[in-house]
Image (cartoon, rainbow, N blue to C red):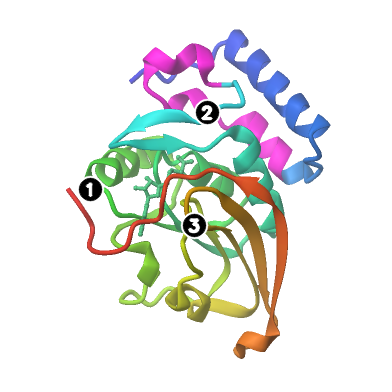
Amino acid sequence: MNLSDTFKHKGLRQQMVDHLRQHGINDEGVLRAMNEVPRHWFLDSALDSHAYDDRALKIGCEQTISHPSTVAIQSQLLALQPGMKVLEIGTGSGYQTAILCRMGAKVFTVERQKGLFDKTRRLLSDLRYNARCFLGDGYRGLAEVNYGPYDRIIVTCGAPEVPEALMAQLKVGGIMVIPLGNGEQEMLRITKHGDDRSLWQVEKFGTYSFVPMLNGKAMK
Ligand code: SAH
């Protein structure tokens, strides 16, 4: 693994951040984290020259790392404060996880593909991001290990419905950011003002295209 971070990488990263700013990202914490975390470390070295393009890229196991603009909008919608407990569904490359850690969150992240889980857990630990990584089905959240409830939940795969178990693990007053739909998804921010469904405030933030959130047991 090549963990160099050259002037070229840094320059391209600054350009990426300028592009995000021009496209409406104004949370300075998000912009700072995205300027500091080298996205190319989360990609195969063959993709190095594209690491700072606003593109989704392949990360193996038929999965993709989200566009930088998608990572930025989801991170901004979370309205994070340092020290908050965040549950992430869909660890993938670990890039979004690293951004949340850099922003001072305590991150718990769940991935269902064993290959990605093993690789990314090792990478995040080598890079000293202290996220807790779990292999499992994110539909169920982290029901069996009692770290919740969470201040924030972020889903980074396209969910056909809002998983009940996840809403149950969100604190009252907490926020979930989730792309909802089959095929294309609408980005939703759900604020849980109370346990009753009638107290869940839903806001919509445009259309995105994610890999699907798959139901069922963790896969090899
Ligand atoms: N945040 C990631 C995005 C990866 S793509 C990144 O920045 O790289 C979405 C990930 O969600 C994939 O790795 C996929 O395997 C995972 N996923 C899909 N369904 C899931 C489920 N039910 N539970 C946990 N992870 C899931």
Rounded to the nearest angstrom, the CA distance separating label 1 from label 2 is: 22 Å
Helix, strand or loop for disc 1: helix
Asked if the residue at label 2 sits under 8 Å from ligand 1, the reply is no
Type of the residue with mark 1: Lys
First reached walking from the N terminus: tag 2 or tag 3: 2
Residue 42 makes an appearance in the image? no
Asked if the residue at label 3 sits under 8 Å from ligand 1, the reply is no
Q: Nearer the viewer, residue 220 or 82?
A: 220
Q: Which mark is residue 107?
A: 3
Span shown in magenta: 30-51
Q: Where is residue 219 in the image (x, y as percent from the top left)?
A: 20, 52
Q: Which residue lies furthest to the front in this view?
A: 183
Mark 1 vs 2: CB contact within 8 A: no
The dominant secondary structure in magenta is helix
Type of the residue with mark 3: Val
Q: Where is residue 8 in the image (x, y as percent from the top left)?
A: 60, 9
First reached walking from the N terminus: tag 1 or tag 2: 2
Give the number of callouts: 3
Residue at coordinates 66% horizontally, 42% vertically from top-left? Answer: 72
Q: Residue 114 carries which label?
A: 1
Mark 2 vs 3: CB contact within 8 A: no
Rounded to the nearest angstrom, the CA distance separating label 1 from label 3 is: 19 Å
Front disc: 1 or 2:
1
Q: Does the magenta stretch include residue 34?
A: yes
Q: Which mark is residue 39?
A: 2
Q: Badge 3: how crowded within 10 Å, few (<14), some, or many (20+)?
A: many
Residue at coordinates 37% horizontally, 63% vertically from top-left? Answer: 138
Q: Nearer the viewer, residue 41 or 127?
A: 41
Type of the residue with mark 2: Arg
